[in-house]
Image (cartoon, rainbow, N blue to C red):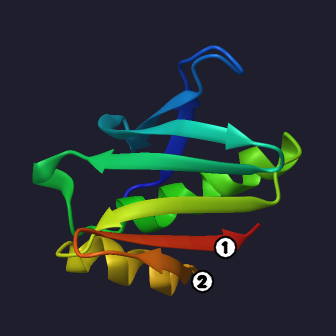
């Protein structure tokens, strides 16, 4: 797999967004949706042609490291309950269930 990096493209703290790069290619993006105290939530998207290559698995620890440097200690993510790949990814990264309903699974982890 090519090296995965993040490139900050937003404005802090109004628009916290990053491009995900895999080698020299744009591979997706991460947006922080909510900031509350020392916690944040986010969304991640990887280009369909590049999925299942470990890009999200490599990019998320980079995001967590960056957010920890900015004073955060907890990440939250909401995933559609039918999205088995994202659920497996996040559980593999140490996320734990904190809420769920018929459509959404909410996970959290300490940084």
Within 10 Å of disc 2 (Cα), the crowding (few <14, some 14-19, many 20+) is few
Quarter of the picture containing the N terminus is: bottom left
Q: Position of residue 24 (x, y in %)?
A: 36, 35
Q: Is residue 93 visible?
A: yes
What label sits on residue 34 in the rendered view?
Answer: none
Tags 2 and 1 touching, CB below 8 Å: yes
Q: Is residue 89 left or right of residue 18?
A: left
Q: Is residue 69 left or right of residue 66?
A: right
- Distance, label 2 to label 1, CA atoms, is 6 Å
> Marks 2 and 1: which is nearer the front?
1
Q: Quadrant of residue 93?
A: bottom right
Q: Is residue 67 left or right of residue 5?
A: right
Query: Residue at horizontal 59%, vertical 39%?
Result: 34
Disc 2 target residue:
94
Looking at the rendered structure, the secondary structure element under dot 1 is strand
Query: Residue at horizontal 17%, vertical 75%?
Result: 82
Q: Position of residue 69 (x, y in %)?
A: 86, 45
Looking at the rendered structure, the secondary structure element under dot 2 is loop
Quarter of the picture containing the C terminus is: bottom right
Q: Residue furthest front?
A: 101
């Amino acid at each position: 797999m090519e090296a995965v990096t993040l490139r900050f493209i937003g404005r802090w703290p109004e628009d916290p967004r990053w491009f995900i790069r895999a080698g020299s290619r744009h591979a997706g993006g991460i947006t922080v949706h909510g900031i509350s105290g020392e916690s944040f939530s986010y969304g991640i998207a990887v280009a369909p042609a590049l999925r299942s290559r470990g890009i999200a698995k490599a990019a998320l620890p980079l995001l967590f490291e960056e957010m920890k440097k900015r004073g955060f200690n907890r990440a939250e993510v909401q995933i559609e309950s039918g999205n088995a790949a994202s659920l497996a990814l996040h559980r593999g990264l140490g996320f734990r269930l904190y809420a769920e309903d018929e459509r959404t699974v909410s996970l959290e982890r300490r940084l």
